[in-house]
Every structure is written in structure tokens, then in C-alpha cells.
């Protein structure tokens, strides 16, 4: 292997770490796929995410609680953005329906 190839592999490894460095994500994803079909929508509306099964390493109790709060805020912001997009889509759809009705009536 040339020095150039070695450096290219070093860059690739920084961008995409090996599987063994991210086994926590692999198993969190497996847990997500196993839990989702068994989710009770009356108890949990939102689908499971891999981050629900990740263990935050190296945090004390206070840091862990702060991390959970930040995670809740991010989820709430994501829901709000999806609701805004759904509202915009509905308004566009409704506007298209109104225009088509005007054209059908000949006015």
C-alpha cells in the first residue's frame, strides 16, 4: 500500500468509522426494528427511533437528564416542522381544488 492510499484510508475512516466502533448504533437499530411492530399506538404515538435505545456513555445523572430534555425538545421541534409542512400541503391542495372548481363552472 502506498502512502497516498494509506492517507486515503485514514480520511475514509474519519468520515465513516468502522462497524466495530459503532456497534451501539447497530444494536440500537436492531432494537428499534424489533420494538416497532410491537408498539402499542394507544400508549406511544410516535414510532421508535434508534436513539431511544442508545446508551449515553460517560454521562453522570445530571448530564443524562439534560440530554433527555434536549432530545424531547428536538422531537417536539421535528413534530412542529412536520405539522407546518402538512398544513402548507393542505393549503396548496385546497387552493388547487378551489381553482379547479372555478374553471369547471366557466367563471
Image (cartoon, rainbow, N blue to C red):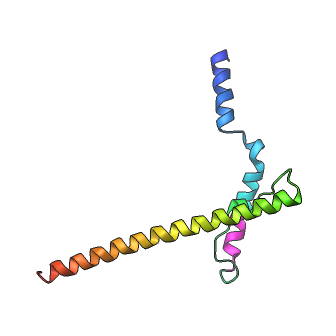
Residue 60 percent location from the top left of the image:
88, 56
Q: Residue at x 40, y 70 (%)?
A: 89
| Direction right: furthest residue | 60
Residue 38 lies in the magenta stretch: yes
The C terminus appears in which quarter of the rendering?
Answer: bottom left
Give whichever of 99, 46 is nearer the camera: 99
Q: Residue at x 81, y 55 (%)?
A: 56
Residue 74 percent location from the top left of the image:
64, 62
Question: Relative to 17, does residue 41 appear above or below in the rendering?
Answer: below
Give whichever of 2, 59 is nearer the camera: 59
Magenta residues, as a range?
Answer: 32-40
Q: Residue at x 69, y 76 (%)?
A: 39
Residue 68 percent location from the top left of the image:
76, 63
Quadrant assignment, res 6: top right
Q: Main secondary structure of the magenta part?
A: helix
The N terminus appears in which quarter of the rendering?
Answer: top right
Give whichever of 87, 3 is nearer the camera: 87
Quadrant assignment, res 31: bottom right
Residue 65 appears in view: yes
Q: Residue at x 71, y 61 (%)?
A: 70
Q: Is residue 57 left or right of residue 89?
A: right
Q: Is residue 102 left or right of residue 29?
A: left
| Direction left: furthest residue | 106
Quadrant assignment, res 67: bottom right
Residue 101 percent location from the top left of the image:
21, 81
Q: Is residue 7 left or right of residue 57?
A: left
Residue 2 appears in view: no
Amino acid at each position: 500500500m502506498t502512502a497516498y492510499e494509506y492517507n486515503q484510508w485514514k480520511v475514509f475512516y474519519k468520515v465513516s468509522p468502522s462497524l466495530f466502533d459503532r456497534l451501539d448504533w447497530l444494536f440500537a437499530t436492531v432494537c428499534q426494528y424489533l420494538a416497532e411492530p410491537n408498539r402499542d399506538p394507544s400508549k406511544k404515538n410516535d414510532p421508535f427511533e434508534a436513539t431511544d435505545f442508545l446508551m449515553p456513555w460517560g454521562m453522570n445523572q445530571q448530564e443524562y437528564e439534560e440530554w433527555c430534555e434536549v432530545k424531547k425538545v428536538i422531537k417536539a421541534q421535528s413534530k412542529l416542522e412536520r405539522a407546518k409542512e402538512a398544513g402548507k400541503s393542505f393549503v396548496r391542495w385546497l387552493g388547487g381544488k378551489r381553482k379547479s372548481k372555478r374553471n369547471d363552472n366557466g367563471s
